Each structure stands twice: as C-alpha cells, then as structure tokens.
Image (cartoon, rainbow, N blue to C red):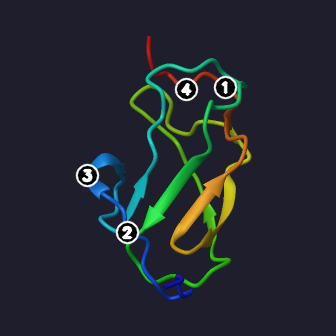
C-alpha cells in the first residue's frame, strides 16, 4: 500500500533533537562546525502537527554567547511534515564547541 498525502511520517522522535515547542523536532547538528561551511547532511525540521505542505519554515539560532546567529539558506517548506534545509550555513561563529 502506498502512502497517502495525509499519512503521518512515522519517526522515532526520541532520536531527534527537541526544540522550544513540543510539536517540532530537528535532526542533529554537529557539536562544532566551521563557520560558512555547509553541513555534512541536510538539516531537517519535523513536526507532529498536521501542517499543510508548502508551509514556510524559518530557522533562528542562538545560544548563551550569541543571541542571534547569522544563517544562510535558513528557509524551507513543509512536505509531509518535514522541512528540509539544503546547504544550511552558520555565516558567523556559532559559539558552539569553544
């Protein structure tokens, strides 16, 4: 049987990174990554909500040292409850991995 558009993505959310919302999870980020270098994998945001395809997702990144990281390629669109970010980059230091 094929998947219908309305079928939920079956994921083990315990293997994903939580966010500030109980309805959104992300793929892992490396502990340390050089600024302005593409990630080694596509960064993904997963949702448990029934959002329509083509819902715009915009990433924000921050930590204790940097209140608003400068990102490139930080917009993606939901498809089957997943937004895939191609070539996501931290343009300035992230503050991670001192």
Q: Which of marks 1 and 3 is nearer the N terminus?
A: 3
Q: Which of 52 and 12 is in front in this view?
A: 12
Q: Mark 4 sits on what residue?
A: 94
Percent position (x, y) of residue 36?
Answer: 72, 25
Q: Residues within 10 Å of mark 2 (few under 14, many from 20)?
A: few
Q: Residues within 10 Å of mark 3 (few under 14, many from 20)?
A: few
Q: Tell me the element at label 4.
A: loop
Label 4 vs label 2: CA separation?
31 Å
Percent position (x, y) of residue 69?
Answer: 59, 36
Q: Is residue 73 left or right of residue 44?
A: right
Q: How crowded is mark 4: few (under 14 residues within 10 Å), some or many (20 or more)?
A: many
Percent position (x, y) of residue 65?
Answer: 44, 25
Q: In the image, which disc is placed on residue 65?
A: none
Label 3 vs label 4: CA separation?
25 Å
Who's the residue at 69% across and 57% down the image?
Answer: 75
Q: Tell me the element at label 1.
A: loop
Labels 1 and 2 touching (C-beta < 8 A): no
Q: Mark 3 sits on what residue?
A: 14
Q: Which of marks 4 and 2 is nearer the N terminus?
A: 2
Label 2 vs label 3: CA separation?
12 Å
- Comparing marks 2 and 3, which lies closer to the viewer? 2
Q: Which of 91 and 48 is in front in this view?
A: 48
Q: In the image, which disc is placed on residue 10?
A: 2
Who's the residue at 44% across and 11% down the image?
Answer: 98
- Comparing marks 1 and 3, which lies closer to the viewer? 3
Who's the residue at 48% across and 38% down the image?
Answer: 62
Q: Is residue 4 left or right of residue 17?
A: right
Q: Mark 1 sits on what residue?
A: 92
- Comparing marks 4 and 2, which lies closer to the viewer? 2
Q: Which of marks 3 and 4 is nearer the N terminus?
A: 3
Residue 78: quadrant of the picture? bottom right
Q: Earlier in the sequence, mark 1 or mark 2?
A: 2
């Amino acid at each position: 049987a094929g998947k219908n558009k309305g079928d939920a993505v079956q994921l083990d959310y315990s293997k994903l990174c939580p966010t500030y919302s109980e309805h959104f999870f992300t793929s892992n980020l490396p502990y340390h990554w050089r600024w302005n270098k593409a990630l080694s994998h596509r960064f993904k945001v997963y949702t448990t909500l029934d959002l329509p395809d083509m819902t715009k997702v915009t990433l924000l990144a921050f930590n204790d040292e940097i209140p608003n990281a400068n990102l490139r390629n930080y917009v993606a669109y939901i498809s089957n409850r997943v937004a895939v970010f191609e070539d996501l980059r931290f343009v300035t230091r992230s503050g991670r991995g001192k």
